[in-house]
Image (spheres, rainbow, N blue to C red):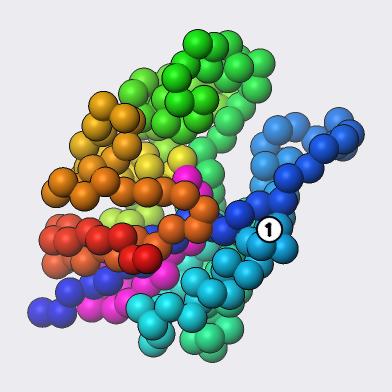
Amino acid sequence: MENTIIYLIRHAETIQENGIRNTNEDSQMINEKEILSVYGEEQSKKLSQNTELNNIDVIWSSSYTRAKATAKYIANNNNLPINLDSKLNERKLGNLKELGEFMKDKKTRDPSQEQLLDRKFKTTDGESAEDTRKRMTEFFDRILKEYEGKKIAVISHGGSIKFLLLNWCEVNKDVKLVYNNLVLDITSPCLLKMTFRKNELINLEQIK
């Protein structure tokens, strides 16, 4: 019985924008359309050249622009199409005013970090860490069954990746995820190698 390898990837750096955005679009639409910075494009290209990502069997990505833009280099190098699944999308932020209230006096200044501590918190029209973990887990359960013994690249987002990892990781005093004493760094981009036997995680490592 061959192990299944999932390379769980957070998208590369996005561009910083100032000025007036289309006020007809809600925060969700704006979030979905964020693009990579020039440096982010370079990061994605370099990431795709990591030897771990040679001979991938299948690629799955969030439907967000920045995730697809990160996936395209891996797809090109492996001569594969990109499969999209909305279960890999970033957790919905929902009402930004409510999110701002939630973040008042918080130490990390990162809502996804704070939601690791308060897993049921969500804004109006938003998702909690637990909501996101459930849909990410449903996706993983499906692909582990469908692609047993294969090498799979999965491109997603910081919050969604962190919340999925709650299935196997502890949260330390610095609000970082820890697996077998290894502190994980879920920055943009990051590459995690997850080894499964059937649907059981037997190893998780961060690839630099």
Q: Is residue 148 above or below residue 109?
A: below
Position of residue 85 measured from the top left corner of the image (x, y, whole percent): 51, 58
**Residue 147 included in the magenta stretch of the image:** yes
**Residue 207 included in the magenta stretch of the image:** no
Q: Quadrant of residue 176?
A: top left
User: Helix or strand or loop: what does disc 1 sit on?
Assistant: loop
Q: Is residue 13 above or below residue 19?
A: below
For residue 133, side relative to residue 43 (left or right):
left
Q: Is residue 128 visible?
A: no
Badge 1 amino acid: Leu
Residue at 28%, 56% in the rendered image: 141
Position of residue 27 measured from the top left corner of the image (x, y, whole percent): 70, 33
Q: Which residues are magenta?
A: 143-158
Position of the C terminus, as image quadrant, is: bottom left
Residue at 89%, 34% in the rendered image: 20
**Viewer-nearest residue: 87 or 98:** 98
For residue 193, side relative to residue 28 (left or right):
left
**Viewer-nearest residue: 163 or 145:** 163
* Residue annotated with mark 1: 36
